[in-house]
Amino acid sequence: NAGVTQTPKFRILKIGQSMTLQCTQDMNHNYMYWYRQDPGMGLKLIYYSVGAGITDKGEVPNGYNVSRSTTEDFPLRLELAAPSQTSVYFCASTRTAGDTEAFFGQGTRLTVV
Amino acid sequence: TQLLEQSPQFLSIQEGENLTVYCNSSSVFSSLQWYRQEPGEGPVLLVTVVTGGEVKKLKRLTFQFGDARKDSSLHITAAQPGDTGLYLCAGRPLYKLIFGTGTRLQVFP
């Protein structure tokens, strides 16, 4: 079972460039999430989705956009990259909104220079 | 605003010592979860506590959910180097899944 797959694993961007971080899950989970994790810190919620076609802002949405056209895919778009967006990004999914386990991808390490 | 505050932020101990990590909030949660994250990996679920006052044990790890469901603790008995990692509590306000500020534990042989 693949679980949650993120691509790419590493990326270096120049200030002002744009990119899309890909996330796909094969568990038929309705709920998907994007987080960023700065060194030694916890995870901060960027955006989340409760199902195809439905997305909402998390704690730190500025500078990011998402879409959810299918149950499987939840890409995160960075427009006009800034050094403050240098971080490790994690995608996660859960089956329901209750106390079910969150499954995470391996992360994307992004550096903006 | 971080709804889940963890303490301590860092913990460095010798093998065999006991330790407790705390997760506190001013909000009531229907359940809280604890995850452990190792370098280069995503967090992995350790336990979910759902009832106020609940205590769950996972080998040398003991998890407690506060009576008011606003806080939780993780106690490790006789820590081992394999316990090293970042420990995160998590809760669900509405449909979101938010994480605490994290406690980085290092256990030296």
Image (cartoon, coloured by chain):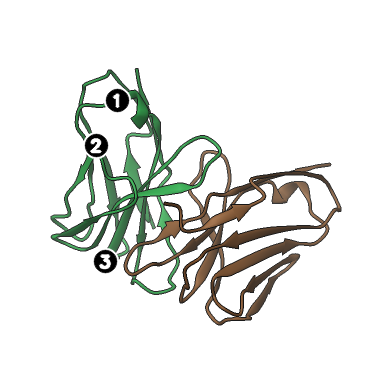
Chain colours: A green, B brown
Q: Is residue A57 above or below residue B95?
A: above
Observer-side mark, 1 or 3, equals: 1
- Residue in front for this viewpoint, B55 or B7: B7
Q: Position of residue A30 (x, y in %)?
A: 26, 66
- Residue in front for this viewpoint, B92 or A109: B92
Label 1 SS: loop
The subunit letter for the residue under badge 1 reads A
- Which residue is situated farthest in the front direction here? B26
| Residue at x 39% of width, y 58% of height | A1
Instruction: Give the mark nearer the N terminus: 1 vs 3.
Output: 3
Disc 2 and disc 1: Cα gap in Å? 9 Å
| Amino acid type assigned to the residue bearing label 1 in the image | Ala
Q: Which mark is residue A10?
A: none
| Residue at x 51% of width, y 58% of height | B4
Disc 1 and disc 3: Cα gap in Å? 31 Å
Q: Which mark is residue A82?
A: 1
Residue at mark 1 shares a chain with residue at mark 3: yes
Q: Dot 3: few (<14), some (14–19), or many (≥20) neighbours within 10 Å?
A: some
Label 2 SS: loop
Q: Dot 2: few (<14), some (14–19), or many (≥20) neighbours within 10 Å?
A: some
Mark 2 vs 1: CB contact within 8 A: yes
Q: Position of residue B30 (x, y in %)?
A: 46, 76
The subunit letter for the residue under badge 3 reads A
| Residue at x 72% of width, y 49% of height | B82
| Amino acid type assigned to the residue bearing label 2 in the image | Gly
The subunit letter for the residue under badge 2 reads A
Pointer 3: what residue? A30
Q: Is residue A41 left or right of residue A48?
A: right
Mark 3 vs 2: CB contact within 8 A: no
Q: Which mark is residue A63?
A: 2
| Amino acid type assigned to the residue bearing label 3 in the image | Asn
